[in-house]
Every structure is written in C-alpha cells, then in structure tokens.
Image (cartoon, rainbow, N blue to C red):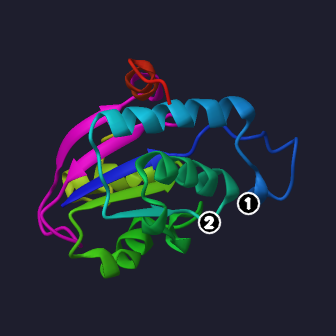
C-alpha cells in the first residue's frame, strides 16, 4: 500500500483572516499547487482515494489536485487530518481504506511529518525528522493499515521539484 502525504499550499496568514479553519490559499498558493498537481499527473500518479483535512486551505489544495488528476469523485473529508489530531487518530480513521492501494492524504504539519516518521520507523517517538514544506509530498510504502512493520520511504519531494515537473512541457 502506498501512502502519499501532501501538505497544503501557501495560505492567507492568520492575521489576515479568521477563524483558523477558513484560511484559504493565496493566489500564489493556488498557482503553485496547480503546477504541483500537474507534476503529480506527469509522474503518472493515480490515487484510489484523496483524503483531506476539512480546513479550507487543505480542502482547496485537495480540490485542485483532484481536478488536475480527474479524481474529483475520489475526494473525502477526514476529520482526523486536521491540526491537533494525533497520528494514532489519523491511522484509526483510515480503517475504511485498508483495501486501497494508493492513498493521498492532504493536511497540515506537524501531523503529516509525524505520520511519515511513524510509518517509516514503526515507532511513536523517534528522532526522525521529515519536514514537509507547503506543497511538499512524501511517499511511504507500507504493508497494511494499520502497518505491521516499518514502511519504506519511497520519495520526499520539495514543492519546487513538483512544480518543475508540472512546468516542463505542460500547456494545461
């Protein structure tokens, strides 16, 4: 099973809007996520499900990616992807997706990097730091949900790398 973790794009600052859950992507954030989504398409990635935090900036990011990949019907909001949730809560919420091969989770830090570290090591507390910048992607291959063994880190792509992939030879 492949778990892909995508951090939301650049959002309006907390000082510019309220409440926290309604902060949308900036115009720059939208543009960058569109390029990153084209990068995902160029890589040939296809997801059985796209699961997103209910917060506006993550939901907007997931919507852009789903549209770019033609997977709008695969999009589901998952409460356990919002800030303040734990890795354990997130993994428990994925029980309905045990038979999926490729899952994209769109959310926030530090939950996404904590989840990646747990999936790779199999340990709740570990000194492995996997930092995802806004628009960054991490791919971890695991044996099952919940994982019985440590997974394998297959890719860690910076947002700029995804955008460059999306910009090369793309007219859409």
Which mark, by number, is residue 138?
A: none
Query: What residue is at 45 percent from the left and 64 percent from the top?
Result: 51
Residue 171 % position (x, y): 48, 24
- Sequence-earlier tag: 1 or 2: 1
Q: Is residue 100 left or right of residue 75?
A: left
Query: What residue is at 24 percent from the left and 76 percent from the top?
Result: 98
Q: Is residue 98 left or right of residue 91?
A: left
Query: Does residue 82 lie above or below 112 as drawn?
Result: below
Residue 146 % position (x, y): 23, 73
Name of the residue lying farthest toward the bottom: 96
- Label 2 secondary element: loop
In depth, the one of 15 and 40 nearer the eye is 40
- Magenta stretch? 132-161
Tell me the quadrant of the picture where the N terminus can be found: bottom left
Q: Does the image show residue 132? A: no
Q: Write down the quadrant of residue 71 in the picture.
A: bottom left
Q: Residues within 10 Å of mark 2 (few under 14, many from 20)?
A: many
Q: Does the image show residue 146? A: yes
Asked if the residues shown at circle 1 and circle 2 are in contact, with their CB atoms under 8 angstroms apart, the answer is: yes
Q: Which residue is mark 2?
A: 54
Query: What residue is at 36 percent from the left and 39 percent from the top?
Result: 41
- Label 1 secondary element: helix
Magenta stretch containing residue 147, yes or no? yes
Q: Which residue is mark 1?
A: 21
Q: Write down the quadrant of residue 155 in the picture.
A: top left
Q: Write down the quadrant of residue 39 in the picture.
A: top left
Q: Is residue 139 left or right of residue 81?
A: left
Query: What residue is at 43 percent from the left and 54 percent from the top?
Result: 70
Residue 123 % position (x, y): 25, 59
In depth, the one of 91 and 117 nearer the eye is 91
């Amino acid at each position: 099973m492949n778990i892909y973790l995508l951090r939301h794009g650049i959002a309006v600052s907390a000082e510019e809007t309220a409440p926290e859950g309604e902060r949308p992507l900036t115009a720059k954030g939208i543009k960058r996520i569109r390029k990153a989504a084209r990068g995902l398409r160029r890589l040939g990635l296809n997801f059985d499900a796209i699961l997103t935090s209910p917060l506006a900036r993550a939901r907007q990011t997931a919507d852009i990616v789903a549209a770019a990949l033609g997977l709008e019907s695969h999009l589901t909001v998952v409460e356990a992807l919002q800030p303040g949730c734990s890795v354990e809560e997130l993994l428990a919420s994925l029980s309905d997706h045990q038979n999926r091969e490729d899952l994209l989770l769109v959310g926030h830090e530090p939950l996404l990097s904590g989840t990646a570290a747990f999936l790779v090591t199999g340990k709740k507390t570990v000194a492995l730091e996997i930092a995802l910048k806004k628009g960054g992607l991490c791919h971890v291959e695991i044996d099952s949900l919940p994982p019985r063994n440590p997974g394998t880190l297959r890719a860690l792509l910076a947002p700029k790398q995804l955008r460059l992939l999306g910009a090369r030879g793309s007219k859409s």
